[in-house]
Each structure stands twice: as C-alpha cells, then as structure tokens.
Image (tube, rainbow, N blue to C red):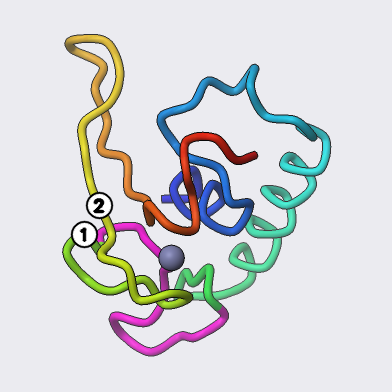
C-alpha cells in the first residue's frame, strides 16, 4: 500500500526500478513521513481523509478516477514469477518517463 501511494505522491511510475529514481533521499523522507503520520492513527490514510474509500490515492482504486486528474487508475502484476505484486498507478500523473 505504501509503495503504491508513495509512487503516486512522488509522480513515479511503479514499474520503474528504484535505481531510476532521481532523488532517492527525498523519496525515503516522504516514506518516513507517511509511515509516521499513520503510526499514531487507528485508521491508515495516505490522503489525509479518514472516510471509507477516501483513504488512498491509487491503492486498490483500479478502474476508479484519479483523485488528482480524473484518469482511470490502472492495476497490473509486476515482479518475478512467484514474487509478483499488484501495482497501482495513474498513467497521467505517473508517466513512465517521469521521476
Ligand atoms: Zn492522475
């Protein structure tokens, strides 16, 4: 969940390798902030909205409109066989070339 949400808030396409991320220390800081905020809450949210179905930007929101631009959120399986995981992203906010 945090990987998907962090990629979205950073504009990074989740299919790209970590080695492609231009400013990794910044990404790590954001991850820490996201975890810290949720550590003290009973309900996890990366949007700041604690209402049901409003708590994430892209995670488990495939086929729904992006909260930022309205583009349909995509989902795909990524990774080596046996170690696949679902990745969620907005093709407009997280183009393959960005980040
Ligand atoms: Zn978007």
Q: Residues within 10 Å of mark 1 (few under 14, many from 20)?
A: some
Rendering quarter of residue 28: top right
User: Is residue 81 found left or right of 88 in the rendered image?
Assistant: left
Residue at 21%, 59% (x, y): give it. Answer: 62
Q: Image point 28% across, 60% down: which residue?
A: 73
- N-terminal label among 2 and 1: 1
Query: From the image, which quarter does the C terminus lie in?
Result: top right
- In the picture of the structure, the residue carrying the numbered disc 2 is 74
Q: Quadrant of ligand 1?
A: bottom left
What is the total number of numbered labels drawn onto the structure image?
Answer: 2
Q: Nearer the viewer, residue 87 or 71?
A: 71
- Residue carrying label 1: 62
Q: Nearer the viewer, residue 9 or 1?
A: 9
Cβ of mark 2 under 8 A from ligand 1: no
The spot of residue 76 in percent (x, y) is: 21, 38
Residue depicted at x 72% and y 42% = 27
Q: Report the magenta stretch's main SS.
A: loop
| Contact flag, marks 2 and 1 (Cβ < 8 Å) | yes
Label 2 vs label 1: CA separation? 5 Å
Q: Is residue 42 left or right of residue 87?
A: right
Please provide the residue range marked out in magenta. 48-60
């Amino acid at each position: 969940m945090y990987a998907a949400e962090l990629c979205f808030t950073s504009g990074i396409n989740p299919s790209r390798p970590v080695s492609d991320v231009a400013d990794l220390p910044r990404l790590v800081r954001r991850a820490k902030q996201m975890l810290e905020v949720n550590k003290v809450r009973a309900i996890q949210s990366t949007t700041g909205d604690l209402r049901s179905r409003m708590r994430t930007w892209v995670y488990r929101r495939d086929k729904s409109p992006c909260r930022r631009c309205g583009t349909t959120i995509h989902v795909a399986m990524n990774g080596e066989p046996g170690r696949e995981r679902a990745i969620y992203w907005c093709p407009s906010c997280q183009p393959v070339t960005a980040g």
